[in-house]
Image (cartoon, rainbow, N blue to C red):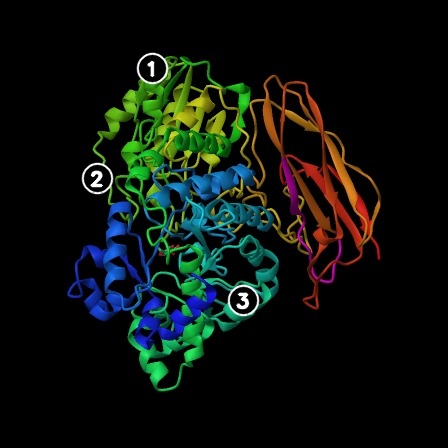
Amino acid sequence: MKESELRTLLSDLSLEEKIGQLIQLPGYFQNAGNITGPAGDMGFTQEDLRLAGSYLSIIGAEKLKKMQTEFMAQHPHHIPLLFMADIINGYRTVFPIPLAQACTFDPELVEDSAAVAAREAAASGIHVTFSPMADLVRDARWGRVMESAGEDPFLSGHMAAAMVRGYQGSDLREPGRIAACLKHFAGYGAPEGGRDYNTVELSERTLREDYLPAYAAAVNAGCELVMTSFNTLNRIPSAANTWLLREILRREMGFEGMIISDWNALEELLAHGIAADPSEAAFLALRAGVDMDMVSPIYACNLKALVENGKVPMKWIDESVWRILSLKNRLGLFEHPFKDADETAEKTVLLSDENRLRARKCAEQSFVLLRNEDALLPLSGTDAVFIGPYAESPLLNGVWSIFADDSDTVSLGSALRRCPQTREVPIARGCTMCDPEQPPIGFQHPLPLETLDAETALEEAVRLAKNAEKVVLCLGEHRECSGEAASRGDLSLPRCQLRLLDAVAAVNSNLIVVLFTGRPLDLRPLAEKAKSILLCWLPGTEGGEAVLNTLLGANNPSGKLSMSFPYCTGQVPVHYNHLNTGRPWKGGIREGRFGSKYQDIPNAPLYPFGYGLSYTTFTCSPVTLSAAHLTRSSTIRAAVTLTNTGTRTGTETVQLYIRDLSGSVARPVRELKGFTRVSLAPGESQEVAFTITEEMLRFYRLSMEYASECGDFDVFIGCDSRTDNGARFTLTE
Ligand code: BGC
């Protein structure tokens, strides 16, 4: 539709029709039939259902085409609905969770994964995905770390932008493209105590320096929508935060797309104690700039009266409706209301061999080898037994894979049985996945009672382990232990799994742990007892194949941690890019009382950001700089030579960190500023160079101006965030 036609449409709409556009209803309203169901209980009228702008979480080409047809036929202006859903890491073909995808340090691969998810979802009639989540995270207790790209602003920004490109392409009207909704604006990843939905307090400097850049990267990549966060940020809930939405997001970041609240967040303004009644909640949210109300009845039940009594200017309503109509128009829905919904395409695109292959490649690249003493991995094929609750479990998708079917997932057990080399290897469960006496509370899909005679299962596992050359122990957190509302106060593995670990380790020291998890865990017992640890996260549909390929050496692990694994729960939040403090503690020696340290644990995480081994080994030569001085108009070339010193071809991610030694405000001990993946054959060397510019040195100065300051800087280039391989340069005027 031409812009002039869209303007005419807007001006032709009645107030009720305009307000209708601002409302998003949940799919279950449709399933429940009509207004006597949950919709009526919440205060919606039949008219609201008739005029709504969008529905979420309904899928299926046939269903959505029928719904769109019927809806448009009865709508006074025949405006199409927007169909939105959470397509987080795949639709029917599930990719690794986003935290794992970030471990690939490969934005192109992540873009490609998002493009596959978009193609599948589009075929099923979806127009918008609630992804990427660009919330920076530092606290593994928060269950939603699994949806993030981890603790680093630079890496998170690259991943968020890659996902936006993957979903949207260069033109939303292209077949197989959907619009991306960046979330959750802002600061949702920093809840007090790691408890979901909890209070967030961030200084403006920390917010701008660390938390906003990843959102800004997604906005710059052209994301069409932004979702507000549930939390208060410095005591103001985001959905009512005019400064955050109008000043930062719209004016400073230049975001012109549509803003949607999170699920029922407008009604939650009452619980936050910022709105005295639903009418005030509607006023505050619209004033702040929330265009669409997800699921709550706040806009539907209050905006009309607010406009009629003059408290809400029509201009606010019109601006929001315009943004929603414009998005519908950019998606081409006025001409093609079904967009790509197509039952035939669903049959060929969803779970196609090609998509499965891409999911497998992505999973393989996301695995992080945390330990490999005595080169216990890779296996030679038949020299190991497989034990543990994850050995045959198909629960390898993260909790957001709500449209996937577990029966499509290849478990490790089925991959072992398919592969001629491993067809005969013994497999035993050993124990249940969760502690029978301490089951986690609040599972969305309550576990079927895991029936297992614990003593017999343990005895069988020990018997197998005793007679085997190597043991592959498949452990981890149940997938429902991470994700939304899955915060935990203890990051240990379940006790039954630790008991299995002890029992198996007592009879066989050639222990390899394959770890499945949605978040960093306390891995001390594993690091003590297992010679090898392969972190496989929640790898998705092709998880089993990807794990087996890696265990057998067909894939050489190359993932790097996107989030530090803490030494223990008491150490979180922990992140590599912290400030130095006035009393930095070098660690190692237990001496001196008054340093910034713990009495009982180290300051360093067990496995830091950027860390990950390979079946081969790499060395980095000392850093060489093309100049010792940098100016605003010059650059420095910083280079190392990377050599594969092992016996296999492998891929290393070379990382560039910079430290500003002195500034008008305290500066982090180092910050990631570049990374490159390099593949090398045994004995091969390659020069890896980065260009350092003045722009990379900018930060929020004392005055809050975003600029660099002259002085000395350390540059480190190496294979993880601890590298000391450095050189110094000076920034001059
Ligand atoms: C989550 C969002 C999600 C929305 C819609 C909320 O509970 O916080 O991330 O997109 O539900 O399903």
Residue nearer the viewer, 468 or 198: 198
Which residue is the site of mark 2? 448
**Residue 265 drawn in magenta:** no
Rendered location of residue 660, percent (x, y): 73, 52
Q: Amino acid at mark 3?
A: Arg
Which residue is the site of mark 1? 423
Q: Amino acid at mark 1?
A: Arg
Rendered location of residue 20, percent (x, y): 32, 69
**Of labels 3 and 1, the one closer to you:** 3
Q: Is residue 260 above or below residue 489?
A: below
User: How many numbered marks are there?
Assistant: 3
Residue 228 visible? The answer is no
Q: Which mark is residue 250?
A: 3
Residue nearer the viewer, 514 or 696: 696
Residue 8 visible? The answer is yes
Looking at the image, tell me whether mark 1 or mark 2 is earlier in sequence order.
1
Predominant SS along the magenta part: loop
Residue 278 found in image quarter: bottom left
Rendered location of residue 382, percent (x, y): 40, 12
Q: Residue at x 42, y 74 (%)?
A: 318
Q: Residue at x 30, y 72 (%)?
A: 300
Ligand 1 sits in quadrant: bottom left
Looking at the image, tell me whether mark 3 or mark 1 is earlier in sequence order.
3
Count neighbours of disc 3 (C-alpha within 10 A) and say few if under 14, some if 14 to 19, many if 20 or more.
Answer: some
Q: Is residue 178 above or below residue 357?
A: below
Question: Helix, strand, or loop for circle 2?
Answer: loop
> Which residues are the magenta region?
661-676
Question: Helix, strand, or loop for circle 3?
Answer: helix
